[in-house]
Image (tube, coloured by chain):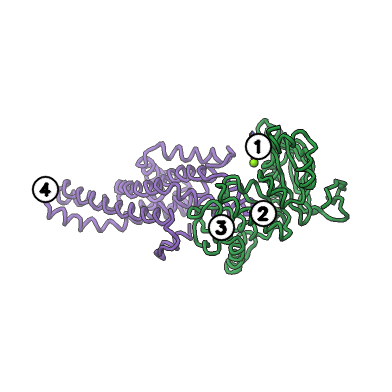
Chain colours: A purple, B green
Amino acid sequence: MDIALIIESIQTLLGGVVLTLELTILSLLIGFVLSVPLAFMRASRSPWLSWPVLAYTYVFRGTPLLVQLFLIYYGLGQLAFVRESFLWLLFRDPFYCALLAFSLNSAAYTIEVFRGGIQSVPPGLVEAAQAIGLSPTKISLRIVFPLAFRTVLPSYANEVVGMIKASSLASTVTLLEITGLARKLVSETFAPYEVFIAAGAIYLGLTFLASRLFNLIELHLSGAPPDKARRPWLLKLRQAL
Amino acid sequence: MQTAIDIHSEDGRHGRGAATASLRAENVHKTLGTHPVLRGVSLAAYPHEVISVLGASGSGKSTLLRCLNLLEVPDSGEIWFRDEKLDIRPPIGQNGARIGDARQARRVRASLGMVFQSFNLWPHKTALENVTEGPVHVRGLTRRAATERAENYLRKVGLIERRDHYPRHLSGGQQQRVAIARALAMEPEVLLFDEPTSSLDPELTGEVLRTIRALAEEGRTMILVTHELSFAREVSSRVAFMQGGRIEEEGPPDEVLSRPASAGLRRFLDPAC
Ligand SMILES: Nc1ncnc2c1ncn2[C@@H]1O[C@H](COP(=O)(O)OP(=O)(O)OP(=O)(O)O)[C@@H](O)[C@H]1O
Ligand SMILES: [Mg+2]
């Protein structure tokens, strides 16, 4: 094993970190925004609301992300209405194909995570909110979701870490994120061992940072005593939730 | 204090001169599952009255209280808030009874403070945030005005120095007093208490009962479900005894509790006999 080559590879592959993070963070954000209303629909007692969402999560969790990515990347171009509309401006670019696949996939998993949290909120807390005359939307956004989110934070952290790793699939549609760069580097150096060790090390660093971040958030949300000084940015984050 | 004589007319006015009940249930029926929990209950709270509702476990006290603010929707019967009849849609087929006018329900609920047996404070909000939630997000007060109001009520229940504590850092008695402050901050017309001390250790009930007594002395209109007989006798203008989903007996506390007319109430007051 050539340590110097590993270090050199890491330096090259760091160039892909930005793209990896872009894909991951944007997918997670879009997935989050989609999943909040859909998780409430999924948790609803009305079958008219919950069944369509169940169908969606069932399909996206029951098929490989790679297959979803290929369907979008190779498949969308076959559809006339996509080719002939402004959508083609987006989806002829592999970045947006990957972003779409990752977002829809992440949303599907996140919906089920949040649904569990929503259903675990004690009914009495909702009744207390109803009893002061709070509107259903405000009850959902100010009482139920923040409590649900706290409950499922560890599972959501897993989803985030999973997304960082899954973003490596973007390399299959020509994107030069960490894994894509690694494959390119291998074809130039013929040293797959060193190059992929370097890639693995970078992913490990990223997932470590993500876990740490969620540990901090969890620690903070689970309530430091009131007198303990809070980091202002975490305080802002908490208020936002 | 006179007893309620139900000479009501269509506009929701009762006897007692022209006084309108603040809150009134009229012949309310409610079945939960297959169990008929309320079987024709009428109860009216007039301004400044404190009504205690007594009764054995399962007699329907909580269900009655929950019907009054539509947390439970009556299958039949009427709920009146002052001179306004609440819009209730009766059950159809498999679907249970439901609220007809959600806006009205919210507006009326905002004027009916509810205090629960299990406090139900929102654990992700501090004491202060629990109390400002309604003033800001229901009443539309500015945060500054709501904070000022919340601090007043926290001071009133003796917890101003705990304003930034989360519920889990408060004792049960303190949590219940924050819950009372939360209800008061809506400046409600009527306060509804469902066994506010039943989940407290005996040494903590005193502080909560003192708070409730102070509210009674201010002349607030209250309906109080309780098992604290001596407290009920002391603060109530009227007591109602429930049994099997009906109000079995109703009247001034001294009369009803000292000379119970029904066998059910006699047994309830003195299980030994
Ligand atoms: N969802 C339900 N399905 C069937 N029965 C129910 C349901 N909810 C409550 N009940 C029954 O309704 C009855 C009345 O309940 P309620 O809570 O009003 O009584 P309560 O007088 O408040 O009693 P307690 O003193 O124990 O609080 C009880 O016998 C209870 O078992
Ligand atoms: Mg009860």
**Distance of label 1 from label 3 (alpha carbons):** 30 Å
Distance between mark 4 and mark 1 Cα atoms: 76 Å
Is B42 on the left-hand or right-hand side of A156?
right
Whole-angstrom CA distance, mark 2 to mark 1, is 23 Å
**Could you say whether the residue bearing mark 1 is in a helix, strand or loop?**
loop
Q: Is residue B94 above or below residue A122?
A: above
The spot of residue B60 in percent (x, y) is: 69, 38
Q: Earlier in the sequence, mark 1 or mark 3?
A: 1
Q: Chain of mark 4?
A: A
Q: Are marks 2 and 1 on the same chain?
A: yes
Front: mark 3 or 4: 3
Q: Farthest residue to the front: give it.
A: B273
Please rate how many residues cluster around mark 1, counting C-alpha atoms within 10 Å: few if below 14, some from 14 to 19, many from 20.
Answer: few
Name the mark on residue B57. 1
Horizontal and vertical percent position of residue B218: 71, 61
Q: Which residue is mark 3?
A: B130
Q: Residues within 10 Å of mark 2 (few under 14, many from 20)?
A: many
